[in-house]
């Protein structure tokens, strides 16, 4: 079994000598904690990860995703044992491993930079960890061959890393990790150094790989496409805090807050200043000349939370925004991007930049700059967020 449990995990980087005196004078009572860029500054030091809780099932593929500096790589390094845990508990297979050395955690890690030994051949790179464990030579050769076949790098076993392309080197780095048959495989942005075509190919290879090896994956990326295509569940992080945990479909269809709604999805969700109106057990959103009743499931969740009429931020995804000559919202075309199967219309409406995705099969003509368009949306795909907390009012 390869279950991993993170309980209230926290990482604080203490101030170096003299830094605290310079940057933190005596804090006044009730003075709020300072923030610098993405990092939270406290009297303890710089907080990189805060209150991280996650239960990872055996053989599950978990993806940590978020912008740079959100704490995802720090969390992965704490699981690996490369960073000390400031507070909280980390369990692997039910065993507390906070103070267990990395080599004794039965994990393997694939780095962004490949980290291959340049003077060794591919075969020697992949066999190195097994040699350190004094595994018999014939078993090492068997494991290396099996991993090379899985990753389609058998023909490169006698080459040095400098003779390989970026994608081939990353395959070797993954092969070096899987020959050990670890309980947990950790991957820290392994595809970020590859070009777009290779990234697509390697994503497909990783999907195939997880079906062929019996291990749990924890994968870090800032690329939401990787997160959505690879993960059984994804963990969205911001400023060291977990924003939402769920399947790709759950976080896409039911974002917990404005940050998740704007981070997941490409192009990004459209946002408007709107009004949520409650009439008995019915809920409507009013935007410009449009009044749309929310779907029954959304109304039920809002009723359960006893949500009253209020000003809200309305979110509608570009693919759910429909051109309609009778639509209540009016906009003017700024740019029309031809994407092959669809056109991405960039318009200005209600003082906001809005994107509408129009399938080319539905088009009756071309769009020019300055054209007036009308659009609407369904109550099934409208998301309402609190103006005060940014939280989705359904949850």
Image (cartoon, grey):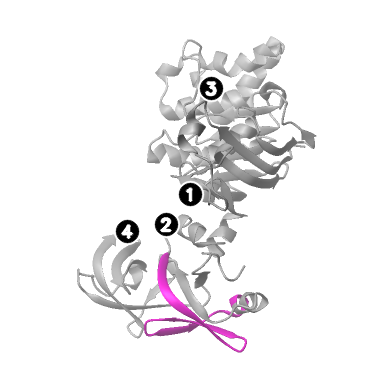
Q: Which residue is mark 1?
A: 224
82 left or right of 334?
Answer: right
Where is residue 1 shown, x and y percent of the image? 77, 37
> How would you classify the magenta stretch by its main secondary structure?
strand
Element type at marker 3? helix
Q: Which residue is mark 4?
A: 340
Does the magenta portion include 102? no
Q: What's the distance in space between the residues labelled 2 and 4, CA to CA? A: 16 Å
Where is residue 218 shown, x and y percent of the image? 61, 39
Residue extending furthest toward the right: 94
Element type at marker 4? loop
Q: What's the distance in space between the residues labelled 1 and 2, CA to CA? A: 9 Å
358 left or right of 133?
Answer: left
Q: Dot 1, crowdedness within 10 Å: few (<14), some or many (≥20)?
A: many
Among the two numbered marks 3 and 4 on one chain, the one whose residue lies closer to the N terminus: 3
Q: Which one is closest to the eye, mark 2 or mark 4?
A: 2
Q: Which residue is mark 3?
A: 154
Residue 266 is marked as 2
């Amino acid at each position: 079994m390869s279950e991993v449990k993170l309980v209230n995990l926290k990482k604080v980087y203490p101030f170096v000598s003299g830094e605290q005196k310079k940057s933190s004078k005596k804090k006044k009572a009730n003075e709020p904690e300072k923030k610098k860029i993405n990092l939270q500054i406290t009297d303890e030091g710089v907080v990189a990860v805060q209150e991280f809780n996650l239960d990872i099932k055996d053989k599950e593929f978990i993806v940590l995703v978020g912008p740079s500096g959100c704490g995802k790589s720090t969390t992965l390094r704490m699981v690996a044992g490369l960073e000390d845990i400031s507070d909280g508990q980390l369990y692997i297979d039910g065993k507390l491993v906070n103070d267990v050395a990395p080599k004794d955690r039965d994990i393997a890690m694939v780095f962004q930079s490949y980290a291959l030994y340049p003077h060794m051949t591919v075969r020697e790179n992949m066999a190195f960890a097994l040699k350190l464990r004094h595994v018999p030579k014939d078993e090492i050769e068997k494991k290396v061959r099996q991993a090379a076949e899985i990753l389609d790098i058998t023909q490169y076993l006698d080459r040095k890393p400098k003779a390989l392309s970026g994608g081939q080197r990353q395959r070797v780095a993954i092969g070096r990790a899987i020959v050990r048959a670890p309980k947990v495989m950790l991957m820290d942005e392994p595809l970020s150094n590859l070009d777009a075509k290779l990234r697509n190919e390697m994503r497909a290879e990783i999907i195939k790989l997880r079906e062929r090896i019996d291990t749990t994956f924890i994968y870090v990326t800032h690329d939401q496409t990787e997160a959505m295509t690879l993960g059984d569940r994804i963990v969205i992080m911001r400023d060291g805090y977990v924003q939402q945990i769920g399947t790709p479909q759950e976080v896409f269809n039911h974002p917990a807050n404005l940050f998740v709604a704007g981070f997941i999805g490409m192009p990004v969700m459209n946002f408007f200043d709107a009004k949520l109106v409650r009439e008995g057990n019915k809920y409507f959103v009013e935007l410009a000349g449009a009044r749309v009743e929310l779907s029954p499931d959304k109304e039920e969740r809002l009723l359960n939370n006893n949500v009253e009429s209020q000003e809200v931020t309305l979110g509608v995804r570009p693919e759910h925004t429909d051109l309609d000559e009778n639509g209540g919202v009016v906009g003017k075309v700024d740019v029309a991007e031809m994407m092959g199967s669809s056109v991405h219309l960039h318009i200005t409406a209600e003082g906001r930049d809005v994107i509408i995705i129009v399938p080319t099969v539905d088009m009756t003509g071309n769009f020019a700059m300055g054209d007036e368009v009308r659009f609407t949306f369904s109550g099934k795909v409208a998301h309402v967020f609190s103006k005060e907390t940014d939280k989705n009012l359904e949850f």
